[in-house]
Image (tube, rainbow, N blue to C red):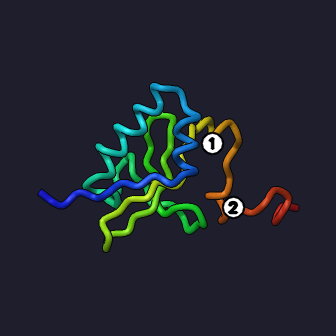
Amino acid sequence: MAEPFAIQITEGAEADVRALPAYARRLVFDGLETHLQYQPTEGTRRIKPLRSNPVAGWELRLGDYRVLYDVDPAEMVVTVQVVGEKIGNRLIVQGVEYTAHESHRPERGEGEP
């Protein structure tokens, strides 16, 4: 069996997880272990590469929750950057809409007639 990736959670992501309800925290931690420990860059229905952005390179979908993370294959480390809840087309992190991961999208009014 392949060597497992170490999973690190940034301080910001820890705060994001603490802001979630208990069932969501369990869902996130179980999902990290199940989906990211051995093949964190294997594209699946749950794991998607993100468009170039300043936050993270990958997204893990866990029901209504999203985990944004980076992978260092040389060091065998997954670093969780952001955890939030997807509501419609918005990502809510600690009760606030999070858009930093959408740097490719023009700002409202920019590029619009």
Type of the residue with mark 1: Val
Compared across the picture, whether 66 is left or right of 26 comes to: right
The amino acid sitting under disc 2 is: Arg
Q: Quadrant of residue 70?
A: bottom left
The CA span between labels 2 and 1 is: 19 Å
Q: In the image, what residue occupies the spot 38% across and 68% down? A: 72
Label 2 vs 1, first from the N-terminus: 1
Using the image as rendered, state which of residue 19 and residue 41 is in the foreground.
Answer: 19
Q: Which residue is at the front of the view, 50 or 111?
A: 50
Count neighbours of disc 1 (C-alpha within 10 A) and say few if under 14, some if 14 to 19, many if 20 or more: many
Q: Is mark 1 on a helix, strand or loop?
A: strand
Image coords of residue 31 (percent x, y): 36, 41
Residue drawn at point x = 63 percent, y = 42 percent: 93
Mark 2 — residue? 105
Q: Residues within 10 Å of mark 2 (few under 14, many from 20)?
A: few
What percent of the width, then of the height, locates residue 64?
A: 51, 34
* 99 over 57 or under it: above or below: above
Dividing the picture into quadrants, the one containing residue 101 is: bottom right
Residue 21 place in picture, x, y as percent: 53, 27
- Going 19% across and 60% down the picture, which residue do you hit? 3
Measured from the top left, where is residue 112 in percent x and y?
Answer: 84, 61
Question: Residue 16 versus residue 41: which sits nearer the camera?
Answer: 16
Residue with the most extreme bottom position: 74
* Residue in front for this viewpoint, 58 or 96: 96
Q: Mark 1 points at which residue?
A: 93
Between disc 2 and disc 1, the foreground one is 1
